[in-house]
Amino acid sequence: MPELPEVETIRRELEPLLAGRTIVRAEIGDPRLTRPRAPAELAGGLEGERISMLGRRGKYLLVGFESTRTLVVHLRMTGSLRHRQAGGDLLPHERARLELDDGSELVYRDVRRFGTWCLLDAVELEGYLAARVGPEPLAPDFSAELLRGRLAGRRTALKAALLDQRTLAGLGNIYVDEALWAARLHPAAVTGSLTRQAVVRLHGAIREVLELGIARQGATLRDYALPDGEAGSMQNEFRVYGRESKPCERCGTAISKTRIAGRGTWFCPRCQRR
Ligand SMILES: [Zn+2]
């Protein structure tokens, strides 16, 4: 599933290609993508819009238009975007296609069909996002003290709290496991019981793994690819994720796999004690 670094990579790649372009034709073939609105209605709303910028909030990609409206895209499990010359063959699992005024097109594909497209007016955007995502972990004002406030008093497993997008935006299964290993914290630790020092370590670790993920252009395991079809390389940097039974790079102990918050969870039983 694309997480913050994957969506940020897509944003950075697409922005110079899309900014200033006008959508001349929009085709949306999947009612699940746009519900509760009808696909044809949303497609009609996109035609003629001129793209001004690409933004991101957590795992949401924001396509901003000069009209001040925004197309809010969430890729969920298996959504992906491909930018290419217009008029290409239908791609497997293609759900939508936007033709641009420079002869290129943006194609949206989604195997599992959990992704969402939502066209919002400027006045609706802030409320839409505020209801769904907490602070941005890479924003300059995201301090350890702010993180501490988000975690304080919570009785849930630390991993569950970090997967909750309202705690902070953008983390998913991969980057949570990697950040917890880097911070030497057990994924099932009681969230509200962390010491100030532990939160400082966690804060640094979250930023570190997200920045590394962006530098490596995301992790390509199955569906994620850059808009030009290339793969990211963050999967080569994993310290724990998917590394069951392999030696911990810090202490040599075999990495364990368990299930926390309903998700496969990898950790070092020696470095990350409860
Ligand atoms: Zn270890």
Image (tube, rainbow, N blue to C red):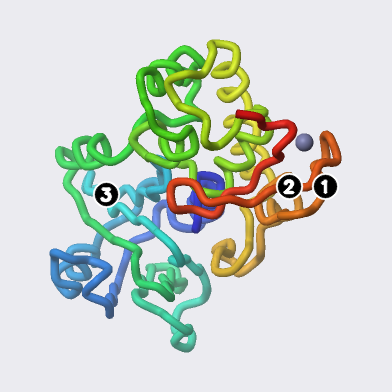
Q: Total label count?
A: 3
Location of residue 206 in the rendering, given as x and y in whole percent from the top left corner:
58, 31
Q: Are marks 1 and 2 in contact (CB under 8 Å)?
A: yes
Question: Dot 2: what SS?
Answer: loop
Residue marked by disc 3 = 70
How many other residues sit within 10 Å of disc 1, few (<14), some (14-19) or many (≥20)?
Answer: some
The CA span between labels 1 and 2 is: 6 Å
> x%, y% of residue 85?
51, 76
Q: Nearer the viewer, mark 2 or mark 3?
A: 2
Q: Point out the tag, 2 or 3, that comes first from the N-terminus.
A: 3
Identify the residue under disc 2. Answer: 255
Q: Which is more N-terminal, label 1 or label 3?
A: 3
Ligand 1 closer than 8 Å to the CB at disc 2? yes
**Residue positioned 58% across, 50% down in the render:** 258
Q: Residue furthest bottom?
A: 89
Q: Quadrant of residue 178?
A: top right
Q: Amino acid at mark 2?
A: Ile
Q: Nearer the viewer, residue 257 or 41?
A: 257
Please name the residue that numbered disc 1 is placed on: 247
Element under label 1? loop
Q: Position of residue 55 (x, y in %)?
A: 40, 43
Query: Can residue 16 be seen in this snapshot?
Result: no
> Do the residues bearing badges 2 and 3 touch, measured as CB atoms within 8 Å?
no
Task: Give the residue displayed 32% in from the left and 48% down from the top.
Answer: 64
Q: Secondary structure at mark 3?
A: strand
For badge 1, the amino acid type reads: Pro
Q: Is residue 177 visible?
A: yes
